[in-house]
Image: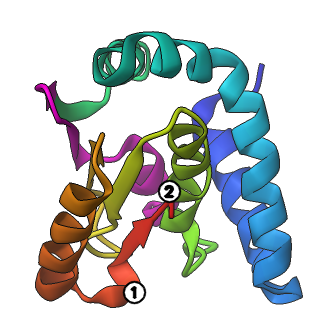
C-alpha cells in the first residue's frame, strides 16, 4: 500500500497533468473516482439518508484521523473540515499544489450525493487553506439558499454544487 504522504503527492501531480489537458479530463477523472466511491457509500446514503452520510464520514474521521466536525438533522448534513490532512500534505510539498487540488472532493462527493437524490453545496473556502465545508440538503431550495450565502462569503469560484 502507498503511504498517504506519497499518495496525496502523486494525486496532486495527476491533477496537474489532467488540468493541463483541460477541465473535461479532470471531470472524467472525478466521475471515475465517484464510481469507485459509490461502491462504498451510495447504498448507505440511499438507505439511511443524512444519517448514512454522517456514518460514512464518521468512519473516515476515525480512519484518516481527520480534524473535522459534522452533524445532521432532519433536513441537512453538515461537515466542516478543520484541517484537511490531504491538502496539508500537498502544501508541504516542494512540487507545489495543483491550483485545482481542492476540486477533487466536490468532484466525486457531489456525484455520489446526487445519485442518492440529495443536493450538495461545497465551500472550498480557500485553495491554499486546508479547510472546507459542505452541506447536503433534502430540498433543492434549501441548498440554493446556502449556495448564495457561501458564494457571498468566499466567492463563486469557491462554491461547488451537484446540480
In the image, is 35 to the left or to the right of 120?
Answer: right
Q: Which residue is mark 2?
A: 106
Instruction: Say how many tags the image has.
Output: 2
Residue depicted at x 39% and y 50%: 119
Q: Which mark is residue 71?
A: none
Mark 1, secondary structure of its residue: helix
Q: Position of residue 3 (x, y in %)?
A: 66, 28
Choose top left, top right, bottom left or bottom right for residue 69: top left
Query: Which residues make up the magenta segment?
Result: 71-92
Q: Position of residue 99 (x, y in %)?
A: 54, 81
Q: Vertical placement of 126 versus 113: above or below?
A: below
Question: Can the viewer see residue 100 in this picture?
Answer: yes
Question: Can the viewer see residue 17 in this picture?
Answer: no
Q: Position of residue 47 (x, y in %)?
A: 48, 10
Q: Are marks 2 and 1 in contact (CB under 8 Å)?
A: no
User: Which one is nearer the viewer's eye here, 130 or 141?
Assistant: 141
Residue depicted at x 32% and y 57%: 140
Choose top left, top right, bottom left or bottom right for residue 1: top right
Q: Vertical placement of 18 versus 135: above or below?
A: below
Q: Is residue 82 magenta?
A: yes
Q: Which residue is mark 1?
A: 157
Crowd class of label 1 (few under 14; some 14 to 19; many from 20; radius 10 Å): few
Protein image colouring: rainbow
User: Which one is nearer the viewer's eye here, 129 or 135?
Assistant: 135
Residue depicted at x 73% and y 68%: 15
Q: Vertical placement of 141 versus 45: above or below?
A: below
- CA–CA distance in space, label 2 to label 1: 12 Å
User: Which one is nearer the viewer's eye here, 139 or 8?
Assistant: 139
In the image, is 25 to the left or to the right of 117?
Answer: right
Mark 2, secondary structure of its residue: helix
Amino acid at each position: 500500500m502507498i503511504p498517504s504522504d506519497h499518495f496525496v503527492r502523486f494525486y496532486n501531480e495527476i491533477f496537474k497533468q489532467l488540468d493541463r489537458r483541460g477541465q473535461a479530463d479532470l471531470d472524467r477523472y472525478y466521475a471515475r473516482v465517484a464510481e469507485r466511491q459509490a461502491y462504498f457509500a451510495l447504498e448507505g446514503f440511499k438507505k439511511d439518508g443524512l444519517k448514512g452520510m454522517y456514518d460514512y464520514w464518521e468512519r473516515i474521521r476515525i480512519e484518516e484521523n481527520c480534524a473535522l466536525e459534522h452533524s445532521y438533522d432532519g433536513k441537512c448534513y453538515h461537515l466542516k473540515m478543520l484541517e484537511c490532512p490531504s491538502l496539508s500534505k500537498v502544501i508541504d510539498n516542494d512540487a507545489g499544489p495543483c491550483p485545482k487540488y481542492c476540486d477533487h472532493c466536490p468532484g466525486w462527493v457531489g456525484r455520489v450525493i446526487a445519485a442518492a437524490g440529495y443536493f450538495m453545496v461545497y465551500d472550498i473556502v480557500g485553495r491554499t487553506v486546508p479547510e472546507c465545508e459542505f452541506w447536503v440538503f433534502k430540498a433543492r431550495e434549501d441548498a440554493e439558499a446556502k449556495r448564495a450565502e457561501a458564494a457571498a462569503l468566499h466567492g463563486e469560484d469557491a462554491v461547488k454544487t451537484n446540480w
